[in-house]
Image: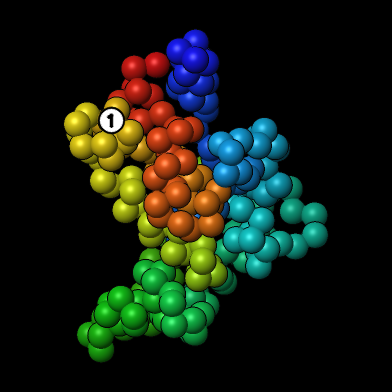
Amino acid sequence: MATHLKHHDLERLSRPAPRICRNVNCGRTLDGVSSNGEIKRQQPSRNDLSLCDVCFGPLYNSSFDPEGKALRRRVERRYLTQFLTGCGKDWCRNEFCKTGRKYLELERPEQVVGSKEALALTKPVLEKLKDQRSPLHFCTDEASQKRRILAEMLAAEGGSATDGGSGGRGAGYDLRWCVAALEAENGDLAKARAWLANWAPTKAEAARR
């Protein structure tokens, strides 16, 4: 039994972190996870933006675009539409969307984003579009957004070695693992905590590797 537990722990510690959607409002991984801890083998990215299929869907176009110029224009249009029109979804909390800004109470009369401001806010995003570490900000579905919010809450919890928040191992979990846990457990926070304790290395453990 002790040997089995040790093997399980070694496997947990050696696992690479899952890849997550580049959209900061999305709670999906790129490759998929399961409730039994399986992280599917990484596949070649199906788009140049490191977005999940759902988030990339509105930007998809089959036209030949080797330099990505047309894709860049579509991203720009998407941002401008979000800023100037909004998605109209009452659950939206996207700071780069007129609707989300309204519900976040960012869209006061003195802070309304017009065309000039929208272009200025979009420009830095476009300049870093090819940088996979640079975030993107698209509206998404309610379930995915809720999972992302919960994942960020879990990742911010941290914890000490005595609080049990990380299965007694302390230091909390990387956001990527938190997103995977909530995706695997369909947004159930209690089950996601258990998934993390069973299958994910803590930040402290990952740093020691």
Residue 89, horizontal then vertical, whole percent? 49, 81
Q: Is residue 154 shown to the viewer in this render?
A: yes
Q: Is residue 26 shown to the viewer in this render?
A: no
Q: How is the image coloured?
A: rainbow
- In the rendered structure, which amino acid carries the disc numbered 1? Gly
113 in relation to 17, above or below: below
Image quadrant assignment for residue 64: bottom right
**Position of 186 compared to 69: left or right?**
left
Q: Report the residue that reaches farthest toward the front.
A: 1
Within 10 Å of disc 1 (Cα), the crowding (few <14, some 14-19, many 20+) is some
129 in relation to 102, above or below: above
**Position of 118 compared to 50: left or right?**
left
Which residue corresponds to the image point at 70% horizontal and 37% vertical from the top-left?
A: 43
Which residue corresponds to the image point at 31% horizontal and 53% vertical from the top-left?
A: 153
Residue 117, horizontal then vertical, whole percent? 36, 74
Residue 103, horizontal then vertical, whole percent? 34, 80
Which residue corresponds to the image point at 48% horizontal and 33% vertical from the top-left?
A: 199
Q: Which residue is mark 1?
A: 168
66 in relation to 23, above or below: above
- Quick one: quadrant of the C terminus? top left
Depth order, front residue of 79/156: 156
**Position of 110 compared to 81: left or right?**
left
Q: Report the residue that reaches farthest toward the bottom.
A: 109
Depth order, front residue of 98/163: 163
